[in-house]
Image: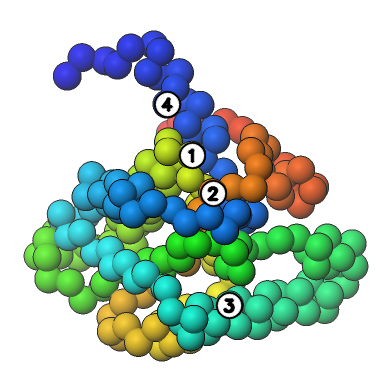
Amino acid sequence: MDAFSPEFREDLHRLMAWRRDVRRFRTDPVPDDILARGLDAFALAPSVGLSEPWRVVNVESAAARAAALSNFQSANAEALAAYRAGGDIDRATLYAGLKLSGMQKAPVQLAVFCDDATTKGARLGARSMPEMRAYSVVAAMTMMWLALRAEGVGMGWVSILDPEALAKSLDVPDSWKLIGYLCIGWPEQAQPTPELEQLGWEAREGLARLERR
Protein backbone atom coordinates (compact mmCIF):
# COMPACT_ATOMS: atom_id res chain seq x y z
CA MET A 1 0.00 0.00 0.00
CA ASP A 2 1.04 3.62 -0.40
CA ALA A 3 2.56 5.48 2.52
CA PHE A 4 0.19 7.42 4.76
CA SER A 5 0.06 11.18 4.54
CA PRO A 6 2.41 13.40 6.57
CA GLU A 7 -0.64 14.59 8.53
CA PHE A 8 -1.55 11.02 9.48
CA ARG A 9 2.03 10.25 10.48
CA GLU A 10 2.08 13.34 12.68
CA ASP A 11 -1.19 12.30 14.34
CA LEU A 12 0.15 8.79 14.87
CA HIS A 13 3.26 10.16 16.55
CA ARG A 14 1.07 12.35 18.79
CA LEU A 15 -1.05 9.34 19.68
CA MET A 16 1.99 7.30 20.70
CA ALA A 17 3.34 10.23 22.71
CA TRP A 18 0.02 10.59 24.53
CA ARG A 19 -0.37 6.88 25.26
CA ARG A 20 0.86 7.26 28.86
CA ASP A 21 0.27 4.89 31.77
CA VAL A 22 -2.77 6.34 33.52
CA ARG A 23 -3.27 5.78 37.25
CA ARG A 24 -5.68 8.57 38.13
CA PHE A 25 -9.15 7.96 36.73
CA ARG A 26 -12.57 9.51 36.87
CA THR A 27 -15.28 7.02 37.79
CA ASP A 28 -17.47 7.80 34.75
CA PRO A 29 -18.31 4.58 32.89
CA VAL A 30 -16.63 3.75 29.59
CA PRO A 31 -19.28 3.14 26.90
CA ASP A 32 -19.49 -0.46 25.74
CA ASP A 33 -18.87 0.45 22.12
CA ILE A 34 -15.57 2.19 22.95
CA LEU A 35 -14.39 -0.76 25.01
CA ALA A 36 -15.43 -3.11 22.21
CA ARG A 37 -13.36 -1.17 19.69
CA GLY A 38 -10.40 -1.38 22.03
CA LEU A 39 -10.78 -5.13 22.34
CA ASP A 40 -11.21 -5.42 18.56
CA ALA A 41 -7.63 -4.17 18.26
CA PHE A 42 -6.47 -7.52 19.65
CA ALA A 43 -7.53 -9.14 16.40
CA LEU A 44 -5.19 -6.82 14.47
CA ALA A 45 -2.15 -7.63 16.60
CA PRO A 46 0.66 -9.88 15.40
CA SER A 47 0.88 -13.26 17.12
CA VAL A 48 3.47 -15.98 16.74
CA GLY A 49 2.23 -18.67 14.37
CA LEU A 50 -1.15 -16.90 14.36
CA SER A 51 -1.68 -18.53 17.74
CA GLU A 52 -3.67 -15.61 19.23
CA PRO A 53 -2.84 -16.79 22.77
CA TRP A 54 -4.45 -13.87 24.59
CA ARG A 55 -7.19 -14.56 27.11
CA VAL A 56 -9.03 -11.60 28.65
CA VAL A 57 -10.99 -11.63 31.91
CA ASN A 58 -13.31 -8.74 32.76
CA VAL A 59 -12.81 -8.25 36.50
CA GLU A 60 -16.15 -6.74 37.41
CA SER A 61 -17.55 -8.39 40.55
CA ALA A 62 -16.92 -6.76 43.92
CA ALA A 63 -15.30 -9.95 45.21
CA ALA A 64 -12.91 -10.27 42.27
CA ARG A 65 -11.91 -6.62 42.43
CA ALA A 66 -11.35 -6.81 46.18
CA ALA A 67 -9.08 -9.83 45.71
CA ALA A 68 -7.10 -8.06 42.99
CA LEU A 69 -6.73 -4.88 45.05
CA SER A 70 -5.64 -6.85 48.12
CA ASN A 71 -3.11 -8.67 45.94
CA PHE A 72 -1.69 -5.36 44.75
CA GLN A 73 -1.54 -3.88 48.24
CA SER A 74 0.39 -6.89 49.56
CA ALA A 75 2.85 -6.88 46.66
CA ASN A 76 3.28 -3.12 46.96
CA ALA A 77 4.04 -3.41 50.68
CA GLU A 78 6.63 -6.10 49.95
CA ALA A 79 8.28 -3.89 47.33
CA LEU A 80 8.45 -0.95 49.73
CA ALA A 81 9.95 -3.18 52.42
CA ALA A 82 12.59 -4.35 49.93
CA TYR A 83 13.60 -0.76 49.11
CA ARG A 84 13.85 0.04 52.81
CA ALA A 85 15.86 -3.10 53.49
CA GLY A 86 18.25 -2.10 50.71
CA GLY A 87 19.19 0.98 52.68
CA ASP A 88 18.19 3.55 50.06
CA ILE A 89 15.93 5.65 52.29
CA ASP A 90 15.42 8.38 49.70
CA ARG A 91 14.32 5.85 47.09
CA ALA A 92 12.05 4.11 49.60
CA THR A 93 10.47 7.42 50.59
CA LEU A 94 9.87 8.33 46.96
CA TYR A 95 8.40 4.89 46.27
CA ALA A 96 6.03 5.20 49.23
CA GLY A 97 4.57 8.38 47.72
CA LEU A 98 4.00 6.99 44.23
CA LYS A 99 0.52 6.16 42.98
CA LEU A 100 1.10 2.87 41.23
CA SER A 101 -2.39 1.69 40.33
CA GLY A 102 -5.82 3.05 39.51
CA MET A 103 -7.61 -0.04 40.80
CA GLN A 104 -9.76 1.81 43.32
CA LYS A 105 -11.41 4.04 40.70
CA ALA A 106 -10.97 2.61 37.20
CA PRO A 107 -14.44 1.67 35.90
CA VAL A 108 -13.08 -1.13 33.68
CA GLN A 109 -10.48 -3.64 34.88
CA LEU A 110 -9.18 -6.47 32.72
CA ALA A 111 -6.78 -9.27 33.55
CA VAL A 112 -4.96 -10.38 30.42
CA PHE A 113 -3.38 -13.81 30.26
CA CYS A 114 -1.30 -15.84 27.83
CA ASP A 115 -2.52 -19.39 27.22
CA ASP A 116 0.70 -21.37 26.97
CA ALA A 117 -1.23 -24.55 26.25
CA THR A 118 -2.98 -23.30 23.14
CA THR A 119 -2.74 -25.60 20.13
CA LYS A 120 -3.66 -22.80 17.74
CA GLY A 121 -0.76 -22.05 15.45
CA ALA A 122 0.67 -25.57 15.88
CA ARG A 123 3.61 -24.07 17.84
CA LEU A 124 4.99 -22.39 14.74
CA GLY A 125 7.67 -19.96 15.91
CA ALA A 126 7.23 -20.98 19.54
CA ARG A 127 9.18 -24.24 19.64
CA SER A 128 12.54 -22.56 20.11
CA MET A 129 11.16 -19.40 21.71
CA PRO A 130 7.96 -20.22 23.65
CA GLU A 131 8.09 -16.76 25.24
CA MET A 132 6.95 -15.41 21.86
CA ARG A 133 3.39 -16.24 22.90
CA ALA A 134 3.65 -13.84 25.84
CA TYR A 135 5.24 -11.21 23.60
CA SER A 136 2.28 -11.60 21.25
CA VAL A 137 -0.09 -10.81 24.11
CA VAL A 138 1.96 -7.72 24.98
CA ALA A 139 1.71 -6.56 21.36
CA ALA A 140 -2.07 -7.01 21.45
CA MET A 141 -2.34 -5.05 24.70
CA THR A 142 -0.34 -2.23 23.14
CA MET A 143 -2.65 -2.16 20.14
CA MET A 144 -5.65 -1.84 22.47
CA TRP A 145 -3.85 0.84 24.49
CA LEU A 146 -3.43 3.00 21.40
CA ALA A 147 -6.96 2.33 20.16
CA LEU A 148 -8.44 3.41 23.48
CA ARG A 149 -6.22 6.48 23.73
CA ALA A 150 -7.38 7.55 20.29
CA GLU A 151 -10.88 7.78 21.82
CA GLY A 152 -9.67 9.75 24.83
CA VAL A 153 -9.73 6.75 27.17
CA GLY A 154 -6.71 6.03 29.34
CA MET A 155 -5.18 2.74 30.43
CA GLY A 156 -2.80 1.75 33.20
CA TRP A 157 -0.83 -1.49 33.37
CA VAL A 158 -0.49 -2.83 36.93
CA SER A 159 2.45 -5.20 37.37
CA ILE A 160 2.94 -5.04 41.14
CA LEU A 161 1.05 -8.26 41.75
CA ASP A 162 1.48 -11.89 42.69
CA PRO A 163 0.47 -13.41 39.32
CA GLU A 164 -0.12 -16.94 40.60
CA ALA A 165 -2.33 -15.73 43.46
CA LEU A 166 -4.33 -13.52 41.10
CA ALA A 167 -4.83 -16.37 38.64
CA LYS A 168 -6.13 -18.49 41.52
CA SER A 169 -8.45 -15.71 42.71
CA LEU A 170 -9.89 -15.38 39.21
CA ASP A 171 -10.17 -19.16 38.82
CA VAL A 172 -8.51 -19.38 35.42
CA PRO A 173 -6.92 -22.51 33.88
CA ASP A 174 -3.45 -23.49 35.07
CA SER A 175 -2.00 -22.91 31.60
CA TRP A 176 -2.95 -19.22 31.67
CA LYS A 177 -0.06 -16.95 32.67
CA LEU A 178 -0.81 -13.39 33.77
CA ILE A 179 0.68 -10.77 31.46
CA GLY A 180 -0.99 -7.63 32.75
CA TYR A 181 -3.77 -6.24 34.90
CA LEU A 182 -5.26 -3.29 33.05
CA CYS A 183 -7.15 -0.35 34.51
CA ILE A 184 -9.22 1.51 31.92
CA GLY A 185 -11.19 4.72 32.17
CA TRP A 186 -11.26 8.46 31.60
CA PRO A 187 -8.10 10.18 32.89
CA GLU A 188 -8.54 12.82 35.59
CA GLN A 189 -6.25 15.10 33.60
CA ALA A 190 -3.95 15.12 30.60
CA GLN A 191 -0.38 14.13 31.45
CA PRO A 192 2.06 14.75 28.60
CA THR A 193 4.98 13.66 30.81
CA PRO A 194 5.02 10.29 32.60
CA GLU A 195 4.36 10.66 36.31
CA LEU A 196 7.44 8.64 37.24
CA GLU A 197 9.51 11.09 35.23
CA GLN A 198 7.78 14.10 36.78
CA LEU A 199 8.48 12.86 40.30
CA GLY A 200 12.10 12.00 39.62
CA TRP A 201 11.90 8.23 39.84
CA GLU A 202 13.75 7.78 36.57
CA ALA A 203 14.72 9.78 33.49
CA ARG A 204 13.70 8.84 29.98
CA GLU A 205 16.63 8.22 27.64
CA GLY A 206 14.68 8.84 24.47
CA LEU A 207 15.97 7.15 21.35
CA ALA A 208 16.78 3.46 21.40
CA ARG A 209 20.45 2.73 20.95
CA LEU A 210 21.31 1.17 17.61
CA GLU A 211 24.30 -1.13 17.77
CA ARG A 212 26.07 -2.59 14.76
CA ARG A 213 27.83 -5.87 14.29
From the viewer's perspective, is 183 left or right of 140?
right
Quick one: SS at disc 1?
A: loop
Spatial separation of the CA atoms under disc 3 and disc 1: 25 Å
Question: Residue drawn at (70%, 47%), measured in percent from left and top?
Answer: 195
Residue nearer the viewer, 207 or 156: 156
Q: Of the residues shown, which amino acid type is indicated by label 1?
A: Gly
Say what amino acid the circle numbered 4 marks.
Answer: Leu
Mark 1 lies on residue: 152
SS for callout 2: loop
Q: State the residue position of label 2.
A: 186
* Image position, residue 100 (x, y; %): 66, 62
Which amino acid type is marked by label 2?
A: Trp
Name the foreground residue: 104 vs 57.
Answer: 104
Q: Which residue is mark 4?
A: 12
Mark before the other along the chain sequence, 4 or 1: 4
Seen from the viewer's position, the closer of residues 23 and 206 is 23
- C-alpha span from label 2 to label 3: 19 Å
> Which residue, given by chain and number where applicable, does mark 3 sit on?
69
| Residue 26 location, quadrant | bottom right
- CA gap between label 4 and label 2 equals 20 Å
Quadrant containing the C terminus is top left
